[in-house]
Image: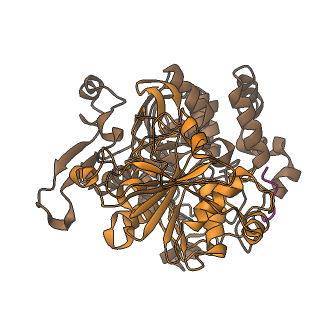
Chain colours: A brown, B orange
Amino acid sequence: MNNAEDKLLDLTAAVRRYVTDGCHLSIGGFTINRNPMAAVYEIMRQRVRNLHLYAHSNGQGVDELIGAGCVAALEIAYAGSGRFAPTCIRFRKAVEAGTVAVEDYSNYQMTLRFLAGAMGLPFLPTRSALGSDIIKKWGFRASRRKSDPRLPNHKLVVIDNPFEGWGNAQRLVLVPAIQPDVTILHVQQADRQGTVRIEGLPFTDVEQAKSARHVIVTCEELVATDRLREEPERNQLPFFCVDAVVPVSMGAYPTACYRHYDYDPVYLNNYRQAALDDDRYPDYLDEFVYGVESHEALLDRIGIDQLSRIQADPRTGYAVGLDRR
Amino acid sequence: MPDYTGREMMAIAAARQINDGDIVFCGTGISMLAAMAAKHICAPSSVIFFETGAVDSRLEEVPLAVADSRVMYGTAVNGSLADSFAVMQNPWTGRRVVGIMGAAQIDPYGNLNSTVIGDYSRPRVRFSGSGGACDVASFVGRTIIFMQHEKRKFVRQVDYLTSPGWLGGPGQREKKGLSAGGPAAVITNLALMGFDTQTRKMFLQGCFPGVTPRQILDNMSFEVDISRSREIAPPSEEELRILREVCDPQRLILN
């Protein structure tokens, strides 16, 4: 809860203040859309370590954080970047090598876990995953769960419907709430106070933000409060949920931001090649992450020619006819 | 007869399974092509629906992920994940949904693995994980599964049961507390597989042109009934034209 009038902060300061070693972090977006990539790259540059990361179906953001060695534990439904990496590559390598602990849920379960956190409830029920190994197999051992006060004692719990057959359900799966230390979103518009407008699909960003103790919002456009309040029904997040507002042009790059720009197939293909090759991957990090001082500097390196190719067409919200091979 | 690829046959075979009026839940990749093609071939009033919350997207270009901005254009509603999964969990709407999905492994009852090969705690190969697949498989009226026909993919027992099919056989879904729906078809690069309404076991429903039932069995780690197999019609010129010119002119998914 933060009522400050002006929450403008630069990205370096916002990450330094809220994203600390060992903190529980959640990032918004979905696979290759609206990942808060500028913030992800800043976390990597600040060499934050031992993050406990939550996402539902994230791609590029999760993979880069894992690739840079920032993540110790991950609770997730899906790690993939669409056709560019059906399974995220550094994620796959880290899990196979045993360097990141993973707990698997379904996408709806992760969504309900954020929603429970947002609602102040310990858990929410669903009928998803009954009979599956998501119920039976636990990534975090029971002993780890008991000894870590930041983890619930159970991955999930199956119960008989306490209302007997009411609602046509015999059994239910209870999934525990998530309350991250910080959630980071990238959105189209925000004002200085932190009111947020997301265009296109909101994914689970709103629940992820409301479940967190602190929220950093990076935005394409900083908009006057009066303008956002002309059409409040288009705003999703009230200002008191937000702690830091950071205007970052193309802050989701190389993932897409509806009505602003598309994902960059050239960058994502280059990333895939580098991620597959353990010898090349440090060079990728040096060139595109550690070797640039800010997101703006990364965009300068990519160059105006490539960036103009992915600019969204105003009619459709994406780059029509973009060569996506 | 026109030339066509295995992937083109798969996409068209799946499109033919979609009924007019179905709400089609699409995963990534070839399932999107099948849903797009179905709207032009056999199911003009089917509705394409994504777990990301996009309802009835106007797909002028093929999306490369379910969160691609292309799914957000021209929709009826851009909802959230909480909305989209509720549509499937709600029996009134959920039973009208047909889910199309892929996996790394499938067993004789259509249970799917998209999580790991080997031991879960230290896997030999790690995949993306469930995403929405387990939710869809748990909730909706009918699912269609895409698979490559290989011994290592059609296995007696999946290494990790990510998405429930018919579980252990008749009555098992209800016993565990799942919806009455379940897998209806498996579409591979060689054949169309169905599930027996009594035993819930997979059987060979039809071979693609030029494929023999023997070839099907040679590419599976378990036996299936082949007595009901018939040859499936090849793609028509019109079906191929729609797939190539309307759905995927850049051949982003077809190649």
The x and y percentages for residue A292 are 75, 34
Can you say which quadrant of the picture contains the N terminus of chain A? Answer: bottom left
Name the residue furthest right: A305
| x 58%, y 61%: residue | B14
* Prevailing SS of the magenta stretch: loop
Vertical placement of residue B143 versus B24, above or below: above
Foreground residue among A134 and A227? A134
| x 32%, y 69%: residue | B91
The x and y percentages for residue A136 are 29, 36
Foreground residue among B52 and A219? B52
Foreground residue among B63 and A3? B63
Can residue A250 be seen at all in this image of the molecule? no
Left or right for B183, reference B176? right
| x 39%, y 39%: residue | B161
Foreground residue among A265 and B91? B91
Vertical placement of residue B68 versus B158, above or below: below
Indicate whether residue A287 is drawn in magenta.
Answer: no
Can residue B5 be seen at all in this image of the molecule? yes
The x and y percentages for residue B11 are 65, 58
Total count of labels? 0
Task: Give the quarter of the image for residue B121.
Answer: top left
Indicate whether residue A322 is drawn in magenta.
Answer: yes
Residues shaded magenta = A320-325
Left or right for A228, reference B139? right
Left or right for A33, reference B237? left
The x and y percentages for residue A112 are 35, 54
